[in-house]
Amino acid sequence: MPPFPMSSVQEARAALAERLRELRLDAGITGKELAARCGWSVAKSSRIENAHTAPSDADIHAWCAACGADGQVADLVAANRQADSMYVQWRRLQRTGMRHLQEASTPLYERTRLFRVYASHVVPGFLQTPGYATALMGTIAAFRGTPDDVSEAVQARMRRSSVVHEGDHRFAMLVEENVLHHRVGDAEVMAGQLGALLASMPLPSMSVGIIPAEAPREQVMWPLEQFTVFDDVRIHVELLAARVTVTAPGELDIYLRAFARLTELAVYGQAARTLIVKAIDGLI
């Protein structure tokens, strides 16, 4: 498992670069001639064609004009923007605050039927209480220096989380035991959050597994970055600086296999409840 899941982004960038190269070759011009027609350095043309530099929309317009392929502009710009959306820094996603990010993902949540969530740092958003979400988002906003719309963002997250109780959705949650002990908010907030986690376990659509801290990792799987799988076709991976969207089949398979192995480490039912109650008792 690579430490930073970037292959999907790289594949998309490489595919776009190859399409631009084919346009140049079909036009029968060299890289040097293309650069001259665009008013660029040869180095810039080479970096774009070899996927070392992501082109701007204006670069694509200029490239297509130089190759006499203006009819390709719309498709190439769309492909470029899709590649750009696969790796997006949080400061860009949250530049106007966090409410919009919650609302923008609501359609994806509503159409997803099976969610697989691996939580290595915080309680999954679906199951967060308003108090826990408020404390968490407040910390994030302060750290990232984003506009403070925490109250509105929490309300949006609660609305988005209605998928837990409405519609035909199923959830498989894996939570590292250390998440139960990471203090988000004060003791009262944490107690309420852990109580809500307990209350979610009997839901017929919900499977909650806790991975014990002492679980042997040598032959199964080490702790990973937090990620959510949407219907086996899309994965959001949460890094410190950015959110990565994974859609490449080979990389999807890696995450699905990792989730399956992590499932082997988890405990369920009474054993899971015992770990949560232990964490609650530790708050006193």
Image (cartoon, rainbow, N blue to C red):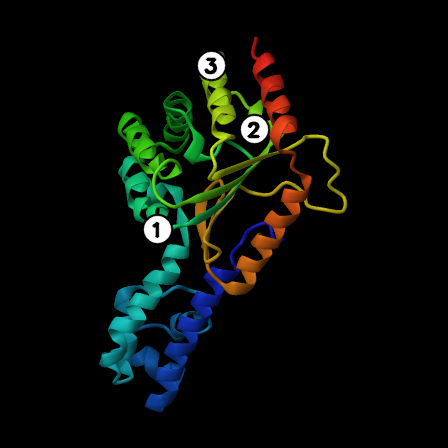
Say which amino acid is labelled 2.
Val
Q: To which residue does mark 1 refer? A: 111
Residue in the picture at 56% in, 16% down? 280
**Mark 1 or mark 3, which has the lower sequence index?**
1
Q: Dot 1, how many residues are within 10 Å of its Cα: few (below 14), some (14-19), or many (20+)?
A: some
Q: What residue type is disc 3 on?
A: Asp
Toward the viewer: 127 or 241?
127
CA gap, disc 1 and disc 2: 28 Å
Which element carries disc 2, helix, strand or loop? helix
Q: What residue is pinned by disc 3?
A: 186
For the residues labelled 3 and 2, the Cα–Cα distance comes to: 15 Å
Q: Nearer the viewer, mark 1 or mark 3?
A: 1
Query: Considering the numbered disc 3 on the image, is that residue within a helix, a strand or a loop?
Result: loop
Q: Label 1 is placed on what type of residue?
A: Arg
Which image quadrant: the C terminus?
top right
Circle on res. 179: 2
